[in-house]
Amino acid sequence: MRRTPYARSGPDLSVEHLACIVPPRGGQGEHCPDTRPVAPVTPAAERRAREDVRERLVRGFPDVAPEELDAVVAEEFGFFATARIRHYVPVLVFKKASRRLAARPGAARGGTGGEDG
């Protein structure tokens, strides 16, 4: 069995050595495209991400009053307001808000918009 790059470790290995490999096509493996952020997140992109998080939470928790959901989303985004790396904030907010809404007393656990976790 062939070991993946993730199974190796050591000080001489850099991030480039840990690129994921998709299943081979025609006997040749291909590296995943580089998905690292290349530019700062724009205010418009942050606004769209905030709206997307809210919409996904509305679908996942239809029993929550809109005011309560908005308050939770605003508080969780506020928690990450000073985060230096902005690209992952919406994912982190979604996960924290989902857990928080699911933990409410008497909360009916619905789907969370495709993300469990």
Image (cartoon, helix red, strand yellow):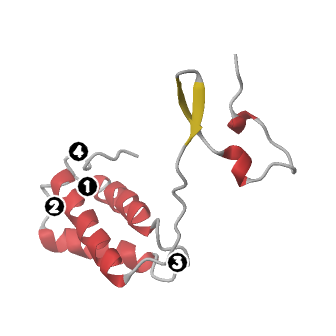
Could you tell whether 86 is left or right of 96 in the image?
right
Q: Position of residue 48 (x, y in %)?
A: 27, 72
The one nearer the camera, 101 or 48, is 48
Q: Which residue is tagged 3?
A: 83
Q: Does residue 96 lie above or below 27 as drawn?
A: below
Tell me which residue sits at (71%, 26%) in the image.
Answer: 3
Which label belongs to residue 64? 2
Distance from the alpha carbon under mark 4 to that under mark 1: 17 Å
Q: Which residue is tagged 1?
A: 105
Amino acid type, label 3: Ala
Circle nearer the N terminus (4, 2): 2
- Residues at marks 4 and 1 touching, judged by CB atoms closer than 8 Å: no
Mark 4 or 1, closer to the camera: 4
For label 3, the SS is loop
Q: Which residue is tagged 4?
A: 111
Tell me which residue sits at (70%, 16%) in the image.
Answer: 1
Tell me which residue sits at (80%, 42%) in the image.
Answer: 9
Amino acid type, label 2: Val
For label 2, the SS is loop
Circle nearer the N terminus (1, 3): 3
Circle nearer the N terminus (3, 2): 2
Q: Does residue 60 lie above or below 48 as drawn?
A: above
Mark 3 or 4, closer to the camera: 3
